[in-house]
Amino acid sequence: MAKAKIKNASYSWECTNKKGQTVKGEMTAASADVVKAELRKQGLVPKKGKIKKKGGSLFSARKQPITTKDIAVFSRQLATMLKAGVPMVQAFDIVGQGHSNPSMAKLIFQVKADIEAGGTLASALSQHPAYFDDLFVSLVDAGEQSGALETLLEKVATYKEKSEALKNKIKKAMTYPISVLVVAVVVSAILLIFVVPTFADMFAGFGAELPAFTLFVVGLSDTLVDNVWTFIAIIIGTIYAFKQAKIRSKAFRDSLDQLALKLPGVSALTTNAAIARFSRTLATMFAAGVPLVEAMVSVAGAAGNSVYQKAIMQVRDDIASGTTLQVSLAQNKKLFPNMLIQMVGIGEESGALDEMLDKVAEYYEEAVDDAVDNLTAMLEPLIMSFLAVVIGGLVIAMYLPIFKMGEVV
């Protein structure tokens, strides 16, 4: 079967030459990665984002985002290739050409080009911090230095897969109540804006005084109809202000994290998730040979809660001053459960800390499942009650005058 012909395109480029001067030009090639590779052969260093395809359509498809799952699959595939004895550059070609996500394939070829230019895999990955975080780069660097890169890549893949599964469990817990509340608000707004005014016009010809509850609902409907855009602006503004406060204010984020550890149902989910992340991340880094003091920085960043982040950094300081991990964790039993402390102690004594932490991570990842089920079970009756009060109340308010029609007749 004949291979499909690859269509070349025209690219504009901007580079820095050996003298540090900026040079520009155009080149026809199959892809931007080919252009970059060719320019590097000529001794030119392409500037970031300065290789652009000419004549692109304004209506071209949006880029497919790169997900954590894409990164995990890439790590697993690369580890398999290296373990099979495939040279790294060739492994990148195989993985990149077979990837279903064009954005991920492009990223893979960019990393490959950096490696071909003489860089290590860790340094090449560090050029893309949006996709390969410090933890990922540190583990790859440790693998390259120890000569066990394929083993470390497998550990990275497992870590990413477990982290993504944990994140999905937490999303599942939050999605159900939020979606139901949104539906309730939308249905209530539709009733108040479109249905209640129709009933109000009908009630006007009854010739009798309307019940107080009905008058309240009709008044609420009139207010909403007269100020519908104002209410929409307030809702959008509130959501935007919340997101901006969360992004810009560390104090606001810290307050939310503290609240998450106090709310019934949510506190168990937050605690179990934080302990699972702590155990999984530390187990992965310790197995890679990263010293505990250095590993704690990445572990704190992966905790997902500022309260735990501060506590883990305190543990790091304790370890740096000579305290064992078990003793340091035991000083804060409010955040670190006894099971974790005891398993860490066994791991330190037996020299199998990473194995013990893996077991703890598995236990608390399952505990997250239970916490999600418990939270859902707790919220379901509350949500049903809310729907009954709001939607049922509106319906009752509209039918109360009809029940009193007999008095008028």
Image (tube, rainbow, N blue to C red):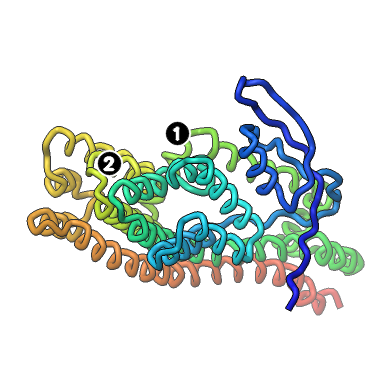
Q: Determine whether 222 is above or below 170 in the image.
A: above
Q: Determine whether 391 is above or below 242 in the image.
A: below
In the rendered structure, the answer to whether residue 138 lies left or right of residue 77 reads left
What residue appears at the point 69 percent right and 24 percent down from the top-left corner?
22
Residue 76 is situated, as x and y percent measured from the top left of the image, at 44, 64
Name the N-terminal-most of marks 2 and 1.
1
Residue nearest the viewer, comparing 398 with 12? 12
Residue lying furthest right in this view?
205
Residue where numbered disc 2 is placed:
311
Residue where numbered disc 1 is placed:
251
Which quarter shows the C terminus?
bottom right
Residue nearest the viewer, comparing 92 with 295? 92
SS under mark 2: helix
SS under mark 1: helix
Q: The residue under label 1 is which amino acid type?
A: Ala
Which quarter shows the N terminus?
bottom right
